[in-house]
Amino acid sequence: MKRCHALFTSAALGAAFCACCGCHRAEHRARLIAIIVPSQDNPYFKAEADAAAARAEELGYRVRVDAHDDDAYRQDNLVDAALASNAAAIILDNAGSDASIAAVRRATRAGIAVFLIDREIDATGVAKAQIISDNNQGARLVAAAFARSVGPKGDYAELLGRESDTNAQIRTRGFHAVLDQFPQLKLVAAQSANWSQQEAFQKTETMLEAHGEIAGIIAGNDTMALGAAAAVKSAGLTRIAITGFDGSPDAIDAIRGGQLQATSLQPAVLISRLAVDEADLYLRTGSTDRPEKQIVPCDLVTKGNADNYRNFEKIR
Amino acid sequence: MNSAAGSISQVSRAASASARFVLLLLRARAVLVLILLLVLFSALAPEFFTANNLSILTKHVAITALLAIGMTFVVLTGGIDLSVGSIAGLSGMAAGYLLTQGIPFNSVVHYPPVAMVVLISICLCLVVGALNGWLVTRAGVAPFIATLGTLYIARGAALLISNGKTFPDLGGTVRRGSTGFPAFGQSFLLHVPTPVWMMMVIFAIAWVVAEKMPLGRHVYAIGGNQRAARLAGIRVQQVTLTTYLFSSLCAGLVGLIIASQLEAAHPATGESFELNAIAAVVLGGTSLMGGRGSITGSLIGAFVIGVLADGMVMLGISEFWQIVIKGVVIVLAVAVDQLQSRLQARLVPFLAQSDQGVAR
């Protein structure tokens, strides 16, 4: 019986040991930068977090990476933890443009500089910077490539992202700003697949069933584009042009393989580095020397230049 | 003969003393683990044991603790309430709606004052709690299924209120007379955050009910043996219904606190909170079979979960390890709970003997 109790204690100690292995080497003099992203099991957010962490460590900061799982309350708790740890700055990919304002404001009031990446919030003057990729420009780029692939005329379908997400709306508006200029390109079906691969697969199967003449599918992100490509393949069809958005490694592989025609790469790595550099500058000089809202253009990735990109970064 | 009997009784007395000690350790395991965690995190993270962080930590714990205290009564009756997370989401959304959209009446939109907003939101939660209680006591649906159903119903309702969108800017405006909501969960009283006060008040009420009042005895009796409780004249249905109402009340408070802290209401708020609450209850030594457990245990359980979560974030442990460690702690807690019951059963003769000894 005593042994069992010892077992329990040692298990708890074991947990603590994992704690020691997990934590970054505690250089007590170095200041802390807390990096908070939506998730660490999604390649985009992983690349974004890794890039920010690498840059911050390079500049001599301690870093801590946490994920809020798109839960504004969890984000709130993580911001609290950053406050309690006397973080010097927070690099944040936020959990909702409305629901994040209070947390950002609280950090700013406590004297912690917050740098937003990837997503904006509906308030200015609260964060030190909001660095985002240009979804509108990226959407126009990929839509132009889509129009080139489909040809001047034909039926096409659109897979939209989650309707409540502002980026889904900006992207579809960008697509149509270009595609609506071709009177002979006809939108025959538009469905939301909620950014999901599996949902895109099912919706595409249904759309292909309903509209036999579809020559192209334009998707609001890469995961949906890959879902659509799988559905096209399982229907035994070829010559359907499919484009995505984000520039994920999977999508770029699919572009090399010819299953996708193009995607718009969001420069997540570049944005993270910019944010950390500005945070560093701000901490040293008290100013970022840049406007709060900064928009970084997306890159078009096609078969011709697919080898120039890796993991949300231009490598050559 | 005499001396032999004396040495036997000495041996058994020594054995029973050590048995008592082990049992005491096992019973107090949640406290021991909590102390261990506090010492550990304080040693590893210099910012951990500061007044500022402990205040933040307790504020976070309050959320889990409120849910766990409400859940404890339900679990003591042998039931379970899976709907608490969804109810929290629903109450936040109801408050968000009332504060930003108001109530249209006679073609004029009325904006109720904050106290009214809180009251209406809580009442809505009590309706869901009543539905839980009705399903369990009258319709004869198993608690797991009944509250799984209301988990979906309440979440769906929360999404329907705003069509899936967030209600932002819950600060209210002076013109509408709706200011003050952020203070509900963000203000301090004597340097202690309001959610912590709420936790303490709810804990005090729950403790008195469980330990000192007939209602509490009835809850334990129902969990111990429902049929016997009924035959003993306990109004099983009413008591059970009350436990679900109390649980939904606590969940409603949590939803309001979170909406107030974020100054925004999001329909997905509170997803999987029920699991944290159940974990806290179980860590606190309450049996999922009902009839055995305590309110204090659940409070300590909530502290263990909260300290573990915040401490691991502070140490910068990888998110994936955090999930694993949390799971390990919960499983170990239940395993030790089983050990305690078995040990207690086996030690009954020893303890009885020594009790006799004491009585003489």
Image (cartoon, coloured by chain):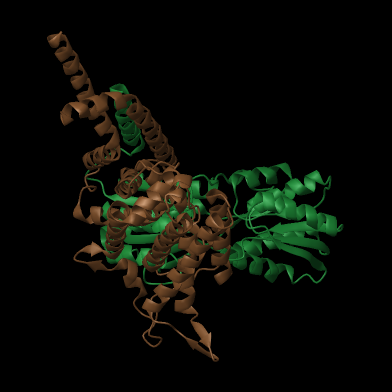
- Residue found at the very far right of the displayed protein: A212
- Residue found at the very far top of the displayed protein: B1
Query: Does the rendering let one see residue A198?
Result: yes
Relative to B250, B300 lies left or right: left
Q: Residue at x 43, y 53 (%)?
A: B233
Provide residue B313's location: percent of width, then percent of height. 35, 46
Relative to A36, A192 lies left or right: right
**Near-viewer residue (B210 or A190):** B210
Provide residue A32's location: percent of width, then percent of height. 29, 49
Provide residue B193's location: percent of width, then percent of height. 26, 63
> Which quarter shows the N terminus of chain B?
top left
Location of residue B181 (image quadrant): bottom left
Query: Does the rendering let one see residue A287?
Result: no
Q: Height in image: A203 above or below B109?
A: above
Chain coloured brown in this rendering? B
Location of residue B63 (image quadrant): bottom left
**Near-viewer residue (B97 or A72):** B97
> Which quarter shows the C terminus of chain B?
top left
Q: Residue at x 38, y 59 (%)?
A: A76
Chain coloured green in this rendering? A
Relative to A71, B286 lies left or right: left
Location of residue B23 (image quadrant): top left
**Near-viewer residue (A278 or B88):** B88
